[in-house]
Amino acid sequence: MNRSSACSTPFKLPIKKLSSEETAPQSLSELIETEKTLDTEIELLESRGYRVEDLDIYIEKLHVYNDLKDLCQMLLGQLDSRPTVAFGERNGVNVGYIVTEVNGRPVRVGGRVESAPGIFFNLFDYLSDANNFPLMMKFSKPGLSANEKIILSSMFHSFHAIGAQLSPCRGSGGICQLITDTFRLQCFQSHTGLKFLAICDPCTGDLQPLLHRLYELYSDYALKNPFYSLDMPIRCELFDQAVRQTVERFD
């Protein structure tokens, strides 16, 4: 098991432990979906291909482990400085998922967990101590890095423009949707060239109503904001909240 050397104090992470009454497990481990949302990535690209906004909305899985033996059925390692499931898919938590929380405490880069302001302990050291069980951990799909999003956004902008020119249909607006075995991508382009992209599960239905609604939110929260400049990143917490609520309600 790979361990980070960034933490000098091993073991005994002072995080509130779960009592048996709080877990009340039906078996050695039980899985609870804490958020009923789509695994969705939202991207806004302006007419030259620059990213204006991006928002990742993933389902988080809450897993209850009662003892060290239960946890040993899953192998955790570090990938890109994040605690990652390397082996042992089970109950909706797949290889590649990252650990985001342990007992309600967020897990930061390098597997560090903050037990008090400015005090960090190592996640792997904490999990190796049987006295810290039972415990809860949250897992989530890993999001793309900022550089990866820039690369993919630029590539899609280029493919969209090429597709519009190669299409045998007159007045083609470019790529509207891509459906693969692993994801579904759908694009809506406004009259000013702003692209709204949604990437989600391939089993998801038509996303055009969702994209049109996001366009309305952009008009309300960005274009009507006197402090917002066109083609600049949207720095509005209310806009992010409205987008999340819209995606969560989308069926």
Image (tube, helix red, strand yellow):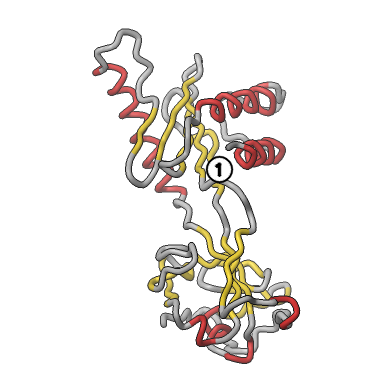
Give amino acid for label 1.
Leu
On the image, the x and y values in percent for residue 204 come to 47, 39
Placement of 96 over or under 126, stated as above or below: above
Quadrant in which residue 119 is drawn? bottom right
Placement of 161 over or under 9, stated as above or below: above
In what quadrant of the picture does the N terminus appear? bottom left
Helix or strand or loop: what does disc 1 sit on? strand
Placement of 151 over or under 9, stated as above or below: above
On the image, the x and y values in percent for residue 38 come to 55, 45
On the image, the x and y values in percent for residue 201 come to 44, 44
Quadrant in which residue 248 is drawn? top right
Quickly name the residue at label 1. Answer: 55
Quadrant in which residue 172 is drawn? top left
Tell me which residue sits at (51%, 32%) in the image. Answer: 44
Question: In the displayed structure, does residue 95 sit left or right of residue 31?
Answer: left
Placement of 43 over or under 121, stated as above or below: above
Q: In the depicted view, which residue is nearer to us: 223 or 8? A: 223
